[in-house]
Image (cartoon, helix red, strand yellow):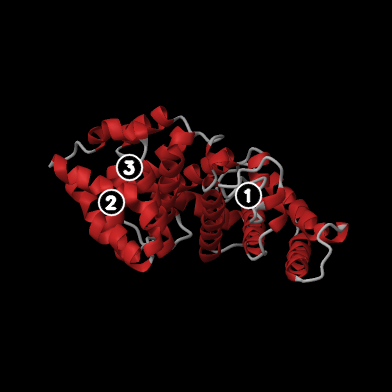
Amino acid sequence: CSSDLIAQAGSSLCSAGSAMAGKYVNEDSVESERPLKVCAEAGRKCVRNIHQYPVLSAEWIALVDSLKQLSRLVQLEGRMPVNPKVLETQGRDAESTGTLWDQETHENAIRILVEEAKVNLCLRMMTDYKRWQMNDAEKRATMEEAMKAYEYNENQLEQKCIQFEECLGMLLHRAFMHVETLQLMDIPLLIEHCGFILETVKVCGSESIGDSRLQETLVLCYFGSLMKHAEALNNAELLAKTRESNLIQMSVEHYLKYLDQIPADTKLTLAEGLAAMADNEDFKTEWEDFFTAENAKANFLMLEEHLSNPILQEKPDKRKDLRPLTDFYACVKRSM
């Protein structure tokens, strides 16, 4: 997708934002809908450019530019005022925040990513990229080959890699916030990806913790989204795969080791995911099977002091949302 089209979409979104905020705007006019259509057109062009290519191939480098443009569109949409008209949609659940198709906030880029069936592909691309990145010998050989083939130096290629991970990771994170996305996902692959990231950091360490755009931090958001929406997915399979991969314990250990570097938004996403997990009916009946390792229960209880209590001190209004988690602490304590 061209930068010109993105620039046009950005300008149109700014105009739309001003119009929607205006007091005397005719909201039903065709003109008021045009900016969003321009944005959707730009987003669809970018999404259709997403294909899987070998890392640092010419096609892959071009793909990075499309991902950058798409992530910019997502950021632009995030600044748009909410659309009050969706509240009047017939049949919409007034108690929910809506789906990608009828929510108040604008997420056309993410919606198109789902409609074009690209989210699973994006996850596979990220999985392959991280495995490539962790293989020092393969990465070095690919970098040297790319430097010979293109007019890029090593620092420029490293920057392309960072941009790829940041932009694609943000798109995945925003997509996984929606249950309708996860319902179409290869959940075992997502759990496997989370496990790989957590295990690799445990063994090799990482300098990326704290950067909310990189996988070593975002993995906690992915885990939180899985737990939050588990009961609306194939709950039994998801929990079985989670138990098999030891994902809960690895996530807890990862958080406790790097808690001082983890952003506040990531902490809240993790806490809300754990609260949903604790309130999951299937999990409640077999929860001890997830804590068989030595110190697993003790480590989990450390979250009370280092995760939920600080959140509740800062955001007392979250007490109801986190109640299942705080109740679960008491349950774990009684079992010890």
Kind of element beneath mark 3 = helix
The dot on residue 278 is: 3
- Would residue 209 appear left or right of 122 to someone viewing this image? left
Q: N-terminal of the two: label 3 or label 2?
A: 3
The amino acid type of the residue labelled 1 equals: Ile
Q: N-terminal of the two: label 1 or label 3?
A: 1
- Alpha-carbon span between mark 2 and mark 1: 33 Å
Looking at the picture, how far across and down is residue 132, in whole percent? 46, 46
Q: Which residue is mark 2?
A: 326
Q: Is residue 137 visible?
A: no
Q: Foreground mark, 2 or 1?
A: 2
In contact (CB < 8 Å): disc 3 and disc 2: no
Picture quarter with the N terminus: bottom right
- Would residue 249 appear left or right of 264 to someone viewing this image? left
Kind of element beneath mark 1 = helix
The amino acid type of the residue labelled 3 equals: Ala
- Alpha-carbon span between mark 1 and mark 3: 29 Å
The dot on residue 110 is: 1
For the residue pair 82 and 219, the one nearer the viewer reads as 82
